Image (cartoon, grey):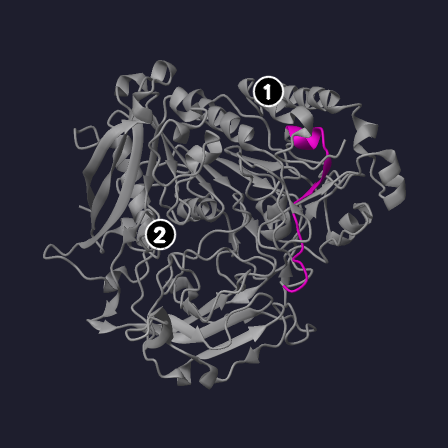
Amino acid sequence: MASHLSIRIDDRRPFAAGHRFGDSGAYERLSGRVLFDVDPRAPAQADVVDIDKAPRDPDGLVRFEADFMILRPTDPASGNRRVLFDYGNRGNKRALQFFNDAPHSNDPLTLAHAGNGFLMRRGYAVAWLAWEGDILPGDDRLVLDVPVATENGAPITGRVRTEIIVDAPAGSTIPLSGRVAAHSYPVASRDKRDAVLTRRRYPYDEPETIPVQDWDFAQQVSGSGAESAAPEQALLPSDSFIHYLAGFDPGWIHELMYIARDPKLMGLGHVAVRDFVSFLKYDATGANPLAGTRLAYGWGRSQTGRCLRDFVYRGYNADAAGRRVFDGVMPHVAGAGRKWLNHRFASPIVSGGQQYEDHFNIADSFPFSYARSVDHLTGREDAILKRPETDPLVFHTQTATEYWVRRGSLVHTDTQGRDLPQPETVRVYCWASSQHSANPLLKAPARGIGQNFSNTVATSMLFRRMLDAMDRWATDGTPPPPSRVPCRADGTLVDHATWRGQFPAIPGVMPLAEANALPLLDFGPEVERGILREPPVVVHGRNDPAGGPGLRYTVLVPSVDADGNDVAGVRAPMVGAPLGTYTGWNPRARGYGHGVQWRFEGSYIPFPDTVSERVATGDPRRAVLERYADWQAYVVAITQAARELVEQGLMLDEDVERCAAEAERWNPARHVVGV
């Protein structure tokens, strides 16, 4: 037996108070735990880092447990016999939010949580399982409990590096993981001789070492005094928190390096997903709450899109019996990354590496594309898809942000930036001029610590058509629309200098100085065993100055039109009929890393309302009233843009009316128009 699981249902209740979703009928919600037993010697999980060092039960098996939740038709015969597996992002459930336009909830139960009911009306079972072993309980997050590796019972230690970046004053005490919701690897010793805390303004600045007397491995606690009831504070020694007397403030990249102990077997997250989805798909017994499932689709966005790519790349889409797990996968806004997961002292909660945050991360490592290519910096040849018997169909979707922030061009180019044809089983779609996270229920444009409003382009209608197209492709071979991406061949994928010459000179707007670069990193001689050198070494060429950015892969961005909007890709209705410039980038404001990209935020830069405003400000873009006579004309333009997407097989007809309704009165939930 290579692996075994049992599902323990702790709670069963009606979903949406028994509301009937068309022919699919009523739904119910199941939740509980999945108990896993795996043979550490079996080839199916032999590549899990440190599995040979995990504790074993009397039968020689490694045990671990995960939270799960399933929404299913109360009458299985009323469903479509398909399961959509939502890779929960950092323990959070997201599928209903993005496919159903529902409010986000980790405890989905009410009719409101069903949103527009799309997934239920289609008859899908929706499943979630905890896969990330560093997530702490709280806020109804899904939690995976994995064992700690030891060396014959003795603690394993290693150097760990944590970046601490805050967007608002965060006080003086922070977990060693840098995240409140994430497990911190405890210090091997609170002696600070093997630890260093530094800070720097920008990623490649020379770091300032913070004196050891100014910080400690400790946690500050507060409360009322026993005698006077006045506020009191105390400092408690801790192996999981850092206390920095001056406090962690915005505008600095703090970096802590220390010797940690007790690495968790994070790679078991892939095993958990593989065995759980395989069980739901293939087990025909009464122990399977989804017995009779015929097809399984995996969807993940951002972190979990990268996890899906890593899952497939590492061969986990073949279960322990060699059967295909996911028939189709839909990684969204993953960019060119995979996952920092199956490594000793991995911190899966950390993002893949942005321009200002989470630097020097192994997540963005070759191969970047589903197609086979050669890494011109190392000579290595590889691909994400290389097991045709079990590889899934792939819809890879990404926004403008991924090109600017997550090296997205490398998904469909080689490492030198040349167009790279993808396998017939892959479609790549660029959702032009949209941003990494597009809230379907946005209430008003917002400006955080970016210089511009965050990008407001709505894209959830594209998810719904995408899932229908995947199901037809997997069911009867009906091919989906061709890939829609910017290309070198037609001049729609360009270097930064070319893009800068195209982007309009909008008054008061500071474009990024460059897209997020990707240096070649050396993680040490044991990297293939999942043991990383921290910090990694930036590899330099013969004539590259020390301390510089090092050898780089070629990262390109979409070309833009006279409005500054992306030319190529799938243009959502708001981009087809624009009221502003919508970008994938948004520079940080002064005091927060001025001028460098703010995480995953894009920009919405409103058009001038009138000709008079355009002339007065010197804005080169046509005014709103030069484009549309009134808001009713804008609704007509949005409707036409939506119908074109329907004709192209990229949007459902039912969403045209929704888009038109939201466009009324200039769509005030997403725009600032003063006419």
Question: Does residue 73 lie above or below 393 as drawn?
Answer: above
**Secondary structure type for disc 1:** helix
Residue 122 quadrant: top left
Of circles 2 and 1, which is in front?
A: 1
Residues 137 and 459: in front is: 137
Residue 393 showing in the rendered view: no
Is 120 left, or right, of 406 in this rendering?
left
Query: Which segment did they paint magenta?
Result: 573-591
Question: What is the residue that sits farthest to the top in this orientation?
Answer: 23
Secondary-structure class at tag 2? loop
Label drawn at residue 656? 1
Callout 2 crowding tier (Cα within 10 Å): few <14, some 14–19, many ≥20 = many
Q: Residue at x 50, y 72 (%)?
A: 247
What percent of the width, then of the height, locates residue 357? Answer: 55, 61
Looking at the rendered structure, the kind of residue marked 2 is Glu
Q: Residue at x 47, y 51 (%)?
A: 338
Per the image, the residue denoted by label 2 is 132
Q: Nearer the viewer, residue 398 or 643?
A: 643
Foreground: 218 or 91? Answer: 218
Magenta residue check for 91: no
Residue type beneath disc 1: Val
> What is the distance, in whole Å, between disc 2 and disc 1 at their CAs?
38 Å
Q: Is residue 450 above or below residue 116?
A: below
Q: Residue 67: percent from the left, percent from the top?
A: 27, 45
Position of residue 248 measured from the top left corner of the image (x, y, whole percent): 51, 69
Residue shown at 59% from the left, 20% from the top: 656
Task: Name the image quarter holding the C terminus.
Answer: top right
Q: Is residue 127 left or right of residue 477?
A: left
Residue that protrudes farthest toward the left in the picture: 58
> Which of the labelled discs sits on residue 96, or is there none?
none
